[in-house]
Amino acid sequence: MPTLQIPPLPFATPLPEHWQSEAQHMLGVKAKVQTWAEVDLDDRLNFGLGIIVLGDGRLVARAPNEPDWQTWELTGDLSLKHFDHAGVGTLELSDSVKRLKVWRYTLSQNLAILRLITEFDLQVRSLRAGHPVTRSSEEICPKCKTPLEPGADECAICTHELHTPPSTWTLFRLWRFAKPYRGQLLAGFLLMLGSTAATLIPPYLTMPLMDEVLIPFQSGADIDPWTVAPYLGGLLGAAVISWSLGWAKTYILAIVSERIGADLRTTTYEHLLQLSLEYFGGKRTGDLMARIGSETDRICVFLSLHLLDFATDVLMIVMTAIILFSINPWLALVTLAPLPFIAWLIHLVRDKLRTGFEKIDRVWGEVTNVLADTIPGIRVVKAFAQEKRESQRFREANRHNLIVNDRLNKTWSLFSPSVSLMTEIGLLVVWAFGIWQVARHDITVGMLTAFLAYIGRFYSRLDSMSRIVSVTQKAAAGAKRIFDILDHVSNVPEPTNPVPFESVKGQIELREVGFRYGNRSVIRNLSLTIQPGEMIGLVGHSGSGKSTLVNLICRFYDVTDGSIRVDGIDVRSLRVADYRRHIGLVLQDPFLFFGSIAENIAYGKPDATRQEIIAAARAAHAHEFILRLPLGYDSLVGERGQGLSGGERQRISIARALLINPRLLILDEATSSVDSETEKEIQRALDNLVAGRTTIAIAHRLSTLHKADRLVVMDRGEIVEVGSHDALMAQKGAYHRLYEAQARNVDGGPVSRPEGNMDRAKHEPA
Amino acid sequence: MNPPDYQISRNAFGHLVLTRAGGERHENVVPIRAFPIAAPGEGVSLVGQDGEELAWIERLDDLDKRTRDAIEEDLALREFVPVIARLKRVSTFATPSTWLVDTDRGETSFVLRGEEDIRHLGQNALLISDSHGIQYLIADLPALDKHSRRLLDRFL
Ligand SMILES: Nc1ncnc2c1ncn2[C@@H]1O[C@H](COP(=O)(O)OP(=O)(O)OP(=O)(O)O)[C@@H](O)[C@H]1O
Ligand SMILES: [Mg+2]
């Protein structure tokens, strides 16, 4: 046994029960488990569970789907490396001459593996150096390298992965939006109660009309107008009351439901805006638009119309039942008998309908997606003469829509008539039973007519009530899709206790940053410190991760590993809006909004004065071309900036970034679409503006970076060289090759797309 | 088909090595299929450490057995797309939802983050990405058993 004295990790999560005895046996009875990680794939990538346990100076492991344990004593020449591809991580244990063992795991185990490697490296390093393991008193999160709070065993920043599904009682969750209007809702409900009760008076009055007026008349008695008048007056009064109460109720509730719908819509949209780019990356525009637009509308209609009707119906049924029972319990029982059947029928079909409606919604989203895809891309469609194909695609989506609808309609169309049939049968039974009772003198003819009048309404309501099933399901499906958005926790979450971020110096520090788009690792183990006011030129082949790095610095995405700090503060502990306020960003493909040029320039600072706007435009060399437009600064820009050239758009977006006077200026290919002359001009303007700000500039034309303090050369997500232009040229490495390839191109022949040159340069022998 | 002008071997670290006829050696060569799903048997590229293509193999069948085995062994470890044979249980029909499935690589469970993570591939195949970016394949939808199809249908 090695006799190293290793202080224990302060927060080792205990080894799972079922591994404990065996692992302890392998490590030695007294040995302490320092850290462990489970692996969930075997050598052939089949699922299975295995474990790696690191004790003091000894690594023991049991591979998945294998019965035996293996042991390695740690020595100075061992190394443990990990990498991942397509969602599968690989951990390799090697000595200096060969590989000793490979483990595979899914990325769900990544954190534990990282922790294992950290501990392993610590022990091996101390073995190599020959002195005992010293742990820094500061515990560091293995994932993001942030120091942990003392005593905490999980990093507050990293553990926000939530997988709780929304509850299925989605419609009830709409209460959150209804709550502010509960006063009106209560008033509406009381009005409804009143108006429903009023509608139940007329059938009741048929009873005395029949028994005291009509039947005596048939048996020869005269009709006394003074007996009839109050009854007729009652009929009229009931109608008027029910009309006025009904009107008030409908009006109040319609207003409330419209408000609820609007609140729902704006809340959803506001929430959507908070979500990270990653969320938008995975969603289709058409689908999101459908959700916010039509689904909220459907919910609103449901609340104002269907739910209201339904509540009225339920009230009516309950009241009718009470009245019927008070008149004659036996007949009432027979009348209500079909009710359970109908309820059962409704229940039967409900599930089928709900899933069906959800499906229809999704298919409908597909149809809008086709539109949202092709309309913005119409130029490409026309350029390649693919109108036929696109219309085919639309037709296909529509056909799919039809199929799904047809399938549902089969069930649905059977449903309503079935309910009607039941009600007809119900009526028949009541007639039969009623006649029998009249014959036995148990009830009067008036009672029977009153019953028939009641249940006529009653059953006709049942029929419409059955319709509530479908609309409820539709609304529930819609609500679910809305809450899908509302429940989505942003991947760049707002911190619970944001650190104030006021006076910014502009130092940026990237600590062992790693980033994946899904399972594609794009940035690997990248560390870089940028001093306040420094200008960094970021160069590298197309696809080397430059824009991604900028996205991370702007916190459009959160890093997968490591951390990014600004003035020593992790960007994840800042409020997103506070942080972005200090960043001026010019993107590779500038986006302009529908509106005037001035509005677009002032986008980041809506209260900017005209002087400020013009100053920014001048600095970006946009002033002159703007003046040439028919309406100057008031000229309207079409959707997505149509009507302006690429270079013009770029200059407007530069002006937009300059206007907010940011501490951090990020220029991603800010001048790629302007001619060399204009570029030089913008460059000169930028040179002044860059002064005193931390600037990160990405450019393929290396000549535009001559002012940079340092150049950072990236290749496949890693930094390969850092230094000044002269130093890097002297080094004759990657930068030298890039530069040479470009210079050669400029000298001979026309300048082609710079990326192309670089790609070729990459394969050239140095 | 000309025989390839290179040799493939495996080094002590378990990685592929490509040696050209001229003696030029490339360590840590990685084979990559161009169409892993649409045409797995065709078009494999051998890529070097720096991501540059060293050789292109039109069809794996054209190689000699030893080379092909070495390449296929590596491909098998690079490509991880478990094929779902059965859906046993889903935690909920709303997303995120945890699915318990049988795959050709054994039983496992994963979290489906949203319905849009299920993508259609052609007529009957589905590709499902889980919350960690692993992709699962359903090769033939109609061939699944009834229970699985019913569960799946709620998400399509
Ligand atoms: N949203 C995304 N999802 C998946 N992969 C992405 C995404 N955005 C970029 N990538 C990939 O990440 C890598 C780096 O992309 P990035 O945009 O950072 O390159 P770049 O260095 O800015 O290239 P260029 O010079 O062409 O602008 C590329 O391989 C790209 O395919
Ligand atoms: Mg880019």
Image (tube, rainbow, N blue to C red):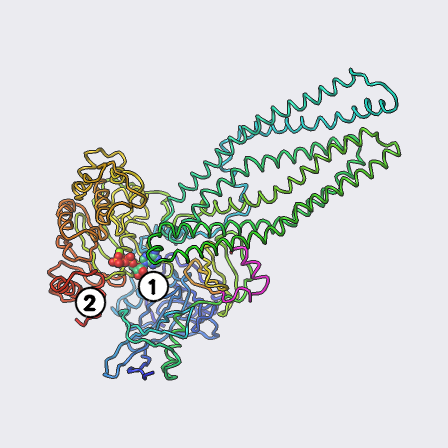
Q: Magenta residues: mostly which secondary structure? A: helix
Q: Which chain carries label 2?
A: A
Which chain is disc 1 placed on?
Answer: A
Residue A761 bears which disc, if any? 2
Please tell me whether mark 1 or mark 2 is closer to you in this view: 2
- Contact flag, marks 1 and 2 (Cβ < 8 Å): no
Q: Position of residue A521 (x, y in %)?
A: 33, 61
The residue beneath circle 1 is A119
Q: Does the magenta stretch include residue B142?
A: yes
Measured as percent of width and height from the top left, residue A245 is found at: 61, 25
Q: Is residue B46 above or below residue B99?
A: below
**Within-10-Å neighbours for mark 2: few <14, some 14–19, many 20+:** some
Find numbered disc 2 in the image and state the secondary structure of the residue it sits on.
helix
Pick the front one: A592 or A133: A592
Mark 1 or mark 2: whose residue is earlier in sequence: 1
Above or below residue A446? Residue A334 is below
Q: Does the magenta stretch include residue A169?
A: no
Q: Give the range drawn in magenta.
A: B138-155
Between A190 and A434, the one nearer to me in the picture = A434
* Secondary structure state at the residue bearing disc 1: helix
Q: Do labels 1 and 2 share a chain?
A: yes
Q: Where is residue A236 in the image (x, y as percent from the top left)?
A: 68, 21
Quadrant assignment for the C terminus of chain A = bottom left
Residue A618 shown left or right of residue A140 in the figure: left
| Ligand 2 image position (quadrant) | bottom left
Which amino acid type corresponds to the residue marked 2 in the rendered image?
A: Ala
